[in-house]
Image (cartoon, rainbow, N blue to C red):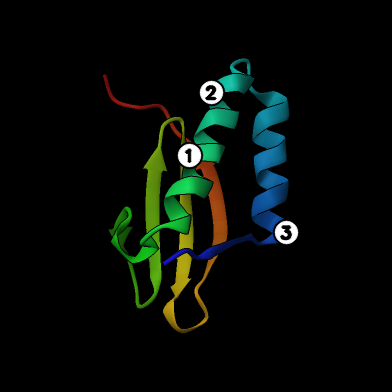
Amino acid sequence: MKFTVVWKPTAKNELAKLWINAKDRSHVRLAADRIDYLLKWDPSFRGESRKETTRILLVPPLGVEFEVHEEDRIVNVIAIWRFKPRK
């Protein structure tokens, strides 16, 4: 079943900053779009678990921390960051 992905204002603002400052804006946009897509479908199985309902997902060059609320079918994106993938 499909989940609703909600970006917390701090995460949304950070994504905007990452995009504005990126030399590779298309990569940042594609990664953010992919994150949205992946979290809509079976988010409890995406990325790695952290504590209780919190998980992280890496889609280079972005990483996100998110919470899954199964009963409400909602995913809250709490934080986002940029990282350099290993070669």
Furthest residue in direction top, as rendered: 23
Vertical position of residue 6 compared to residue 64: above or below = below
Q: How many numbered marks appear?
A: 3
Q: Nearer the viewer, residue 33 or 16?
A: 33
Question: Which quadrant does the C terminus fall into?
Answer: top left
Label 2 sits on a secondary structure element that is helix
Task: Give the number of the mark in front: 3 or 2.
Answer: 2
Q: How many residues crowd mark 2 within 10 Å: few (<14), some (14–19), many (20+)?
A: some
Task: Give the number of the mark in front: 1 or 2.
Answer: 1
Q: Which mark is residue 9?
A: 3
Distance from Cα at disc 1 to Cα at disc 2: 10 Å
- Residue 41 shown left or right of residue 18 in the figure: left
Q: Quadrant of residue 53?
A: bottom left
Q: Position of residue 78 (x, y in %)?
A: 56, 61
Q: How many residues crowd mark 3 within 10 Å: few (<14), some (14–19), many (20+)?
A: few
Q: Disc 1 marks which amino acid?
A: Arg
Instruction: Please name the residue that numbered disc 1 is placed on.
Output: 34
- The residue at 66%/62% (across/down) is 8
Instruction: Please name the residue that numbered disc 2 is placed on.
Output: 27
Sooner in the amino-acid sequence: mark 3 or mark 1:
3
Vertical position of residue 72 compared to residue 39: above or below = below
Label 3 sits on a secondary structure element that is helix
Q: Are marks 3 and 1 in contact (CB under 8 Å)?
A: no
Q: Position of residue 9 (x, y in %)?
A: 72, 59
Q: Disc 3 marks which amino acid?
A: Pro
